Image: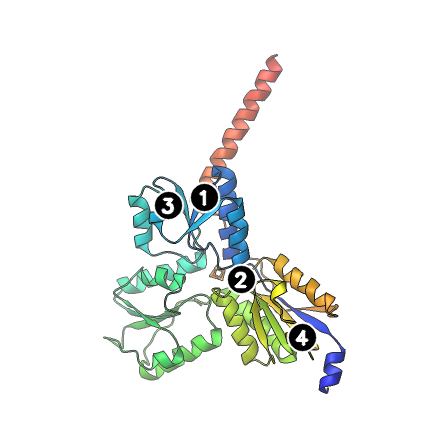
Amino acid sequence: MDADQRTDRKRVLLAKPRGYCAGVDRAVQTVEEALKLYGPPIYVRKQIVHNKHVVRTLEAQGAIFVEENDEVPEGAIVIFSAHGVAPEVHEQARERKLRAIDATCPLVTKVHHEARRFAKEGYEILLIGHAGHEEVVGTAGEAPDNIQLVESPEHADQITVADPEKVVWLSQTTLSVDETMQTVERLRTRLPLLQAPPSDDICYATQNRQQVVKEIAPDCDLVLVVGSRNSSNSVRLVEVALETGARAAYLIDYADEIDPAWLVGVGTVGLTSGASVPDELVMQVLDHLAEQGFHDVAEVSTADETLTFALPQQLKKDLREAAAARAGAAAKLAGTAAEQ
Ligand code: SF4
């Protein structure tokens, strides 16, 4: 097909799975339910998930986002974000008598458990991830004396360990699967006894979103990824699209960020979104593309996702008690009405 034939037919390949993962859904619901149950303001340490739109929407409902616990009034409710926190953050919350609700994704908690267990067994842990990312700070805080960060395949060549026979790698949950395996392979050339985590640390949602982008990218002149710049998994989707054949790929928060020049000479647009992106933003991009003549939309699916996570324990308990109190009050009212 020549360039003219390719651009004659304007179409969109819509990736599935895309958007919200189970951990993000749970974290956002946690803030929404807390706002309804306890009333605003509800304090949230760090962005609950890395998405501008989600944060703005929750702020409008009464959530106050802070960087650290010391910005939260003593005794107030604070929610910890999906990315997880180091144990010292829980400790600070206790000292300030904050009522902490932990919305850490259970799949991040799993990596925290692995870090604690391997550290207890005397392993040196090579944590593959990005310096300064909240998830990495939280995981590293579980075993600061045993963890060394490895940021890239190139960085792997500089790593030295005390005992090459007792070393394991773990990773951030939202990395590029392929780049992480390259990093591991380079570590293994110098550390042949390097152990792998008991199960994948890169979570199902990250893997699935990358897989479907790999599927559509070779057919795309342009791939649009809806997501925020500080969203690790969203940024990785742009990289994966470019590495696997898309002629161009961009990250956007909103439809109005699409530069008309990006669509010039484009026949096929691939569209996806990061794990912290509500689907309404993707639908707005589809509407925008339809206005530019891209009416033909085909969804390309490579996996079905059914995983869900229960709300944090503390919140569930308070919701149950509030429901019981409401039921008790309603029964009392009904009894009084019957007596009259
Ligand atoms: S991207 Fe993965 S680890 Fe992160 S919140 Fe979603 S499911 Fe959890």
On the rendered structure, is 90 left or right of 278?
Answer: left
The C terminus sits in image quarter: top right
Element under disc 1: strand
The answer to which of marks 3 and 2 sits earlier in the sequence is 3
For the residue pair 306 and 144, the one nearer the viewer reads as: 144
Mark 2–mark 1 CB contact (< 8 Å): no
- Say whether mark 3 is within 8 Å of ligand 1: no
Q: Residue at x 65, y 64 (%)?
A: 285
Can residue 134 be seen in the rendering of this structure? Answer: yes
Q: Which residue is mark 4?
A: 263
Distance Cα–Cα, label 2 vs label 4: 25 Å
Q: Residue at x 55, y 51 (%)?
A: 57
| Residue type at tag 2 | Ala
Element under disc 3: loop
Q: Which residue is mark 1?
A: 42
Distance Cα–Cα, label 4 vs label 1: 42 Å
Disc 4: CA contacts within 10 A as few (<14), some (14-19) or many (>=20): some
- Say whether mark 1 is within 8 Å of ligand 1: no
Mark 3–mark 2 CB contact (< 8 Å): no
Q: Which mark is residue 275?
A: 2
| Residue type at tag 3 | Val
For the residue pair 336 and 232, the one nearer the viewer reads as: 232
Q: Residue 322: image x %, image y %? A: 49, 34
For the residue pair 236 and 26, the one nearer the viewer reads as: 236
| Residue type at tag 1 | Ile
Q: Which residue is mark 3?
A: 72
The answer to which of marks 2 and 1 sits earlier in the sequence is 1
Distance Cα–Cα, label 2 vs label 1: 23 Å
